[in-house]
Image (cartoon, grey):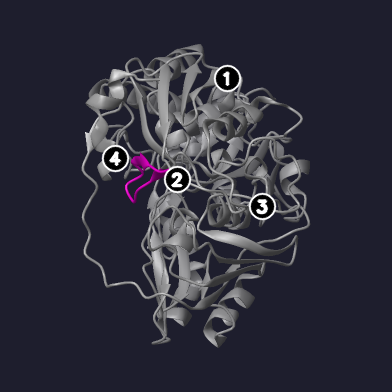
Amino acid sequence: MSDPLFSRRHLLRTGLSLTAGGVLLPSAGLSAPRPRNGGRIRVASTSTSTADTLDPAKGALNTDYVRHFMLYSGLTELDRTLNPRPALAEAIVSRDQKTWYVRLRKGVTFHNGKSLSSADVVYSLIRHKDPRVGSKMADIAKQFAEIKATGPLELQIRLIGSNADLPAILAQSHFLIIAAGQKDFRSANGTGPFKLEQFRPGIRTLARRNPNFWKPGKPYLDEIELIGIPDEVSRVNALLSGDVHLINAVNPRSTRRILASPAHGIVETKSGLYTNLIIRQDRQPTSNPHFNAAIKYLLDRPLINRALFRNYATIANDHPIPPSHPYFRADLPQTKLDLDRAKWHIQRSGVAGVRLPLYASPAAEASVDMASVLQEYGSRVGLNLAVNRVPADGYWSTHWMKHPLGFGNSNPRPTADMIFSLFYKSDATWNESGWQNPRFDRLLLEARGESDHAKRKQLYGEMQGLVRQYCGSAIPVFISLLDGHDRRLKGLYPLPLGGFMGYTFAEHVWWDG
């Protein structure tokens, strides 16, 4: 394929980043201490299980995402402001945001020595459409109409409709590239910064430096051991004792302990992570619009931020776009605690005095405490909420989306389209509240294909207003992600996609011990 788009945009080769519409922006030049080579670190994440996987398509836990970014690379990657940049794709361009042309880097090899080709990329992407794979991105992959190789290092991706966010979507861990034909994931063969040395699901992952990594000079560390310590106090203790050097999901209550140690620090990542109260719109009595409105007026957002998160959170407004996002709509009136309005709506909802079960679990961060706060305020306006605390184990399969009132918890997503497509579109698999809004669905498709930033912001702004007013999702705050680290571990910085530098820390950090 000798498409003129490539010659016009050859500057991608020079390390320039690209925006959704194919517009180029210079990568930020950031001065930093010179990294050192060598060293071994031990990293503790929140969870590990026998379901741990080496298949990027099936990643479900943050431990999976970290493991996959260690072992594999993607066509694109996100910078610290979530703009996509070239990675395995030397160029990815489009005239109409529907048909995209991709050119791969030369000289990239898999861990087993095989050279990267367009056949590997075609296989990696198209398998997400196969229901037998069980990809967590199957809904997103429905947008792929055709993916075909047009040369040894060139391919074409045709979508069912325009989507200016494709470069950002392809940076997700689930879309990391594997070798063509790979079906056995008892081992890993990627192009990532580390090679798999040992993988014991539910116990640990041991990875060693890939000397043939396609980024010259990286990674810096010789070895990384990844383990899971589910209990947060035990995780913090392991850090402070020196047993591990980096942990995630630090409870705000533990920050003082960590910061009291001169040898340790905290990285706060402002993010789009949220725990939301799900108000099913396809069940009685929660589908009543007055009940929906009453719940949102009962949320004491400053109290939740202060008491539950020690101010390591940002006030939210019942839609999933955080204030830091470029498409955030700032002119929407902020919903606030208003007991008089809540009581008025409760009286008209038909549930005054009716005992309503509310399901909460430690699996949805801070939901148990949020439920208690809501129960207290509800009692003041005639709403009788019975909080059912259920175990974290099995919550997502047994309780999530199964009750009229319950809690969800959504990780940050790199684009507005992705969060709306996964959780708010009428036919989305994870449409938590069963909300159906044809106007919202039409706006979603329109915004997806719009490359003009101002027009997209207007479209996404209207969508935020619809979700805030009508959707059965009450979002009180966006939760900051807190990582604890040994201060000898250098190169860490926040990346809004998730903790652990958006799960990509492995190739960037170094040990200065």
Which mark's residue is nearer the viewer, 4 or 1? Answer: 4
Residue at 44 percent across and 52 percent down: it is 214
Q: CA distance from mark 1 to mark 2?
A: 44 Å
Q: Position of residue 90 (x, y in %)?
A: 37, 37
Residue 302 sits in quarter:
bottom left
Q: Position of residue 145 (x, y in %)?
A: 55, 15
Q: Which residue is mark 3?
A: 188
- Nearer-N-terminus badge (3/1): 3
- Please, what secondary structure does the residue beneath circle 2 have? loop
User: On screen, 116 above or below 194?
Assistant: above
Q: Which residues are magenta?
A: 77-87
- Nearer-N-terminus badge (1/2): 2
Q: CA distance from mark 3 to mark 4?
A: 28 Å
198 sits to left or right of 289: right
The reply to whether dot 3 and dot 2 touch (C-beta < 8 Å) is no
Q: CA distance from mark 4 to mark 1?
A: 40 Å
Q: Which residue type does callout 4 highlight?
A: Arg
Residue 165 sits in quarter:
top left
Residue 472 sits in quarter:
top right
Using the image, tell me which numbered label, if any, was put on residue 13: 4
User: On screen, 449 above or below 324?
Assistant: above
